[in-house]
Image: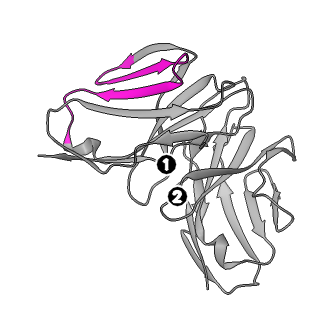
Amino acid sequence: EPEVTQTPSHQVTQMGQEVILRCVPISNHLYFYWYRQILGQKVEFLVSFYNNEISEKSEIFDDQFSVERPDGSNFTLKIRSTKLEDSAMYFCASSEGLGQWETQYFGPGTRLLVL
Amino acid sequence: QKEVEQDPGPLSVPEGAIVSLNCTYSNSAFQYFMWYRQYSRKGPELLMYTYSSGNKEDGRFTAQVDKSSKYISLFIRDSQPSDSATYLCAMTGSARQLTFGSGTQLTVLP
């Protein structure tokens, strides 16, 4: 069964450093998403991406964040200058992109720890 | 008022019990309602979704939506130890961004 994959599974970084989280969405999907879950808190929407541009973004997704589809398979989330409060589990998701609503398939997540 | 509220539990039941999980919401624009299951150290996995009000059944799982009360439920019949997980309600309106509840941690004891 096709699945969303994410690398790395864990990342530890120093405050102020740049990190790039990588995702490989399901191959025929057209919509891609990033969510995050701070420990003990809700899963929160960050951004959706379609046709090589941001479709929607939340208030959390400020200028420190950027997304990119660098090639035909990868989807990345970059945090330019990490803060302590960026420590969270980051989930990538993808969906077919054919209807108004459709299942979003989540990857296993990348646990980011900012020291 | 939080947009989506969900009792975090934890909830512990014996095997075979009927489990009821619930969420309330405040945004009238929500029209798609989902239940995700999340095992430890894994991503959320969609269990069921419902459009607008009504019931939907899938095996041992039944999802109910009451838009007039802004209340959704997930019932699990004949619960099994393998059902032990965190259950997240999620919802959306015309946008694709999902708004999640905080999750209810369920343990089914053998």
Is residue B39 covered in magenta?
no
Residue neighbourhood size for the residue with mark 1, other residues' Cα within 10 Å, grouped as few (<14), some (14–19), many (≥20) = many
In terms of image quadrants, where is residue A24? bottom right
Pointers 2 and 1 within a single chain: no
Q: Which residues are magenta?
A: B57-80
Disc 1 is placed on an element classified as loop
**Badge 1 is on which residue?**
B102
Q: B105 or A29: which is nearer to us?
A: B105
Residue A50 visible: yes
Residue A34 image offset from top left, x and y in percent: 68, 52
Please, which chain is the residue tagged with disc 2 on? A
Residue neighbourhood size for the residue with mark 2, other residues' Cα within 10 Å, grouped as few (<14), some (14–19), many (≥20) = few
Which color scheme is applied? one colour
Residue A1 visible: no
Q: Which residue: 52% across, 43% down?
A: B101
Q: Count the numbered circles shown.
A: 2
Q: Which residue: 63% across, 28% down?
A: A102
| Mark 2 residue type | Gln
**Badge 2 is on which residue?**
A41
**Given contact means CB atoms under 8 Å apart, are the residues at marks 2 and 1 in contact?**
yes
Residue B53 image offset from top left, x and y in percent: 53, 14
Say which quadrant the C terminus of chain A sits in: bottom right
Is residue B78 covered in magenta?
yes
